[in-house]
Amino acid sequence: MQQLKSKWQRSLLVAGAVSAMWLAGCGQPPAEAPNAAADITIANTTSGQVKGVLEGDILAFKGIPYAAPPVGDLRWAPTQAMPAWDGVRDASEYGADCMQEPFPSDAAPLGTQPDEDCLVVNIWRKAKPASESLPVVFWIHGGGFVNGGSSPDVYDGSPFAEQDTLFVSLNYRLGRFGFFAHPAVTAEAKGMLGNYGYMDQVAALEWVRDNIANFGGNPNDVTIMGESAGGFSVINLMTAKQSQGLFHKAIVMSGGGRARMGGMRGINEAPEGQLSGEQIGLNFAAFHGIEGEGAEALAAMRALSQEAVTNKLSMIQLFRPDPGPQTYVGGPLMDGEMIAGQQSAVIAAGGAAKVPVLIGTTSMDIGFLGGATKDEVFAQFGDMADEMRATYDPSGELPLDVLRATIGADQSMNEPAHFVAREMTKHGQDAWVYRFSYVAESMRAEWPGAPHATDIPFFFDTVKAKYGDALTAQDARAADNALQAFANFVKTGNPNPAGSDAWPTYQGAHGPIMDFDTNGDATVKDDPWQARLSVLTKFLDAQ
């Protein structure tokens, strides 16, 4: 094993204070009024000027509209350009996160009141950057496509900005606003259908291409990065034709990579035993007493309040659906445009963007596997049932809930990360695989491993916002190592420090990986789960 030591570490983030005299432009002729062109807090966009705010030595612009509000006739329509505005628009506060039903146990609580008018980006960079054209990070939040936003404290882009990158985060439509089908929407046919949240992500990337140079970013050096549903989105952007050329590197955090379990429903078709997107839309309309498939039905649905459209849909309701007909499609739809085929098939065929990829999971990641008994669990693997049993439960003593969680996480997250790296490597792309195993010291009595999404505050180095007074020196060091790896990748396309090759590109056979380990170190090792993941790969490759 090999450890990355001082080269991975940086000093703890200290918010620098910029003197009031400097902010006032001391040294300029006192009789002259401030010039907007010389004011670093003012930037131009294709829709008008925005004014950000200095936060210590970081310049932040928040709540910048990248598209027209998706309300009224634009509900369930492709993303539209933002009209021009007069004057200088305030960009010192977050815009609303997209409409949703927040849930109390969210690991990244929202900082705003959700609203349907939500299509905004936020930007952070140093006030005095090392370059006039910084590499760009484009962050896509998770939340199962029904929750989340760009305003949580743990998504603050300042630590990335301190690393001489420019950080962008965005909001995109969620739940029934973001993923919806109905015959009346299809009949109206304003453009692509169904995946409005994905259309928003592409529109935001186009906004970055057209505007980010005005904020000090390089539009030709963009890294897309996302976790969970955001990671799934990154993989979609890698395989969708609409987003090609808009980014140049990709980071996938717990984003899967294999075919979606149970298949993926389409606008007007679905796998056997499932409903099409349009049928689910008809169910939704009927729930609200709206009948028909024409323009009047669509107008009535668009007249519903945003609260009625949401109808308390959240991550909790996803896993505990209300009784009665299904009224939400469950996420992205096979639309023939944005998603023209299973992403795994596109990747295996070499159809993904030819960019460097950094991909990984947490050591106790998420996954869902049914089975009321162990026999039922293993029966799902058909002819490989005995081999799976011998691999995952050789003594027969593993508790059923642990068995389901372990295989579920391997099937949903851990093996697919290796699959993506393997296939990218086959087609000539550089790929690196990591596992995040670190658990904050204050949580070790509760968590035997790193649960899904607990890596985010470490890779963002926002652990102080997450853990407050419970933060330890080891926690801070773990965040140091994690952020440094991601920042290196954003800047160079390689997660290693300059002059190092300690973390090699993917070599196949489920290794080597970088383990952000339980000691707070970044350690290169062969994947200790290699044997079980190899058996699972054998099963999944045959599907």
Image: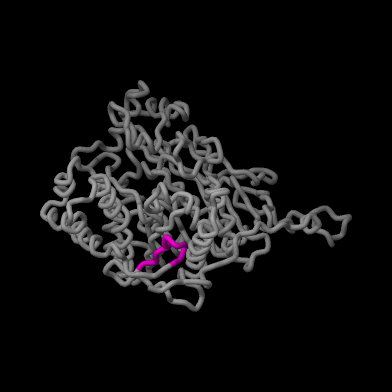
Residue 387 is one of the magenta-drawn residues? no
Residue nearer the viewer, 430 or 338: 430
* Position of residue 228 measured from the top left corner of the image (x, y, whole percent): 39, 50
Residue 236 spot, x, y in % from top left: 37, 54
Residue at image position (26%, 58%) is 345
Residue at (44% x, 39% y) in the render? 105
Give the x, y percent position of residue 141: 46, 49
Q: What residue occupies the far bottom of the structure in this picture?
A: 499
The magenta-colored residue range is: 513-522
* Of residues 268 and 325, the one drawn nearer to the viewer in this rendering: 325
| Residue 221 visible in this rendered orientation of the protein | no
Q: Nearer the viewer, residue 496 or 273?
A: 496
Q: Determine which quarter of the picture holds residue 89.
A: top right
Q: Residue at x 41, y 56 (%)?
A: 253
**Screen quadrant of the N terminus:** bottom left
- Quadrant including the C terminus: bottom left
Specify whether 228 is left or right of 80.
left
- The colouring scheme, among rainbow, by chain, secondary structure or one colour, is one colour
In reply to whether residue 518 is colored magenta, the answer given is yes
**Residue displayed at 37% across by 65% down:** 433
In the rendered image, which quarter is residue 264 located in?
A: top left
Query: In the figure, residue 241 lies in which quadrant?
Result: bottom left
Q: Image check: 320 left or right of 123?
A: left
- Position of 130 with respect to 102 (left or right) is right
